[in-house]
Amino acid sequence: MRKRWHLVISVAALLFQVVAIAFMHVVAQTVYANPPYSSESWAWTVSLVGLALCSGISMLLGCLGVYVLLTRSRLAVAMTLIVLCCIPALIGSAVYAYAVLVFLALV
Amino acid sequence: MFGGLDYIGPPTVFCTQFGLARTLALPTGQFPNRLQVGTLMKRRHAILVALGLACLACVFVLRVLGDGIYWNTAVPPGKELRAALAIRDNVTPFQKWGSEVFTLRYLKRYYGGAWYFTQSKKGDLEKEITSCLDTALERYPCVDIYLLAHSNEYVEWVARLPAERRQRLRLVYNTGCHNKSQGPKWLELGAKAYVGHPGESWSSVFYYFFLRHWTRTGTVQEAVEASNHLMETTLKEWEAITFGHWTAASLMENSVASCYGDGQLRLEVHP
């Protein structure tokens, strides 16, 4: 496993997208379930902070995944994992970042 | 060090081209090291590729998923003279969350007064909403209404308000399916412009573009035309992604928004 850690990063980058999506659903369920578990007042702030964090973590894992694959793996393995795991993570990161900027009405 | 790796094996011949390092030969009797077999890349090239892919992902999202970037996000004059009220009907928690997180900041940024209601059942909050709208109409010369609800009859609620107050209604945008026909009714009540959809529409796609466009630039008619165009582009992308399972033309037929009343209306208000 220790020798394969560079493969784990790219897989973790992809799996992290599930965490990001789950986060949004948890916030939505907490505030808008019937009856709600919590008030709406904090939802906007928490959502934006959460999305910004998800974007940052996703970007970090995606870039790190690409880097270690290109420096530690065979080309065929690297290309496969970059296409299947790292690029989706980077696109996810860009989506969350864009969403934060749009929700802030900055762009 | 070679290509970012600690070289731990016996003497080996390498060549590099375009940042790629390849093992050409291994000493006889040596089992190839994992790091010596296959193709590897130098550190600085790998960093450049990683950052390049991150940039490409951002460009892809801006080009395909979004409507680009509005560089001019200045608030048009007369913010203190206009107010907005939005109503979200009872949909899934995720849809409620998305609607509010997207809408609320725009309303607060571009309107002097902003109210956002989320219903938890059909017909919910009638008293609160009409009372709030009445107050907004009393305090502000121009009040815009955003009806983020499936086929609805909020027009009946507004009709119960005093006629002189309703003259301050300005833009009414309705995401409701088949609610385009309410246009003349809203204009009769006092609204200056009404935007609605004709059939089972993908109004949520339109609304995303419309709110961003209407609050930033141009007239309501321009915002409607630009948002219709962007919605069509998005639906064509979906058509391609689903290999024609969804057809943009039929979706657009039911979704294309129309503007009743004063299409030259702008967000800005001059006293």
Image (cartoon, coloured by chain):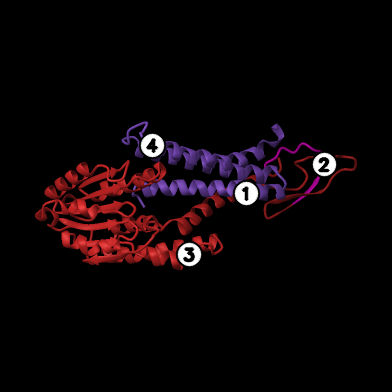
Chain colours: A purple, B red
- Which is in the foreground here, disc 2 or disc 3? 3
Q: Secondary structure at mark 2?
A: loop
Q: Secondary structure at mark 1?
A: helix
- Mark 1, Cα crowd under 10 Å, few <14 / some 14-19 / many 20+, is some
Identify the residue under disc 1. A84
The residue located at (21%, 41%) in the rendering is B128
Residue at left offset 77%, top offset 40%: B34
**Residue A60 coordinates in the image, percent (x, y):** 54, 41
Classify 10 Å Cα crowding around label 4: few (below 14), some (14-19), many (20 and above): some
Residue farthest toward the right in the current orientation of the protein = B29
What is the CA distance from the residue labelled 4 to the residue labelled 1?
34 Å
Tell me the distance, in whole angstroms, between the alpha carbons under discs 3 and 4: 34 Å
Whether residues under marks 2 and 3 lie with C-beta atoms below 8 angstroms apart, the answer is: no
Q: Amino acid at mark 2?
A: Pro
Magenta extent: B4-15
Q: Give the numbered dot on residue B236.
A: 3
Q: CA distance from mark 2 to mark 4?
A: 58 Å
Q: Tell me the chain of label 4.
A: A
* Mark nearer the N terminus (4 vs 1): 4
Mark identifier at residue B32: 2
To the question of a shared chain for discs 2 and 1, the answer is: no
Quadrant of the rendered image containing residue A3: top right
Residue A33 disc label = 4
- Identify the subunit bearing mark 3: B
Residue at (66, 44) in percent of width and height: A69
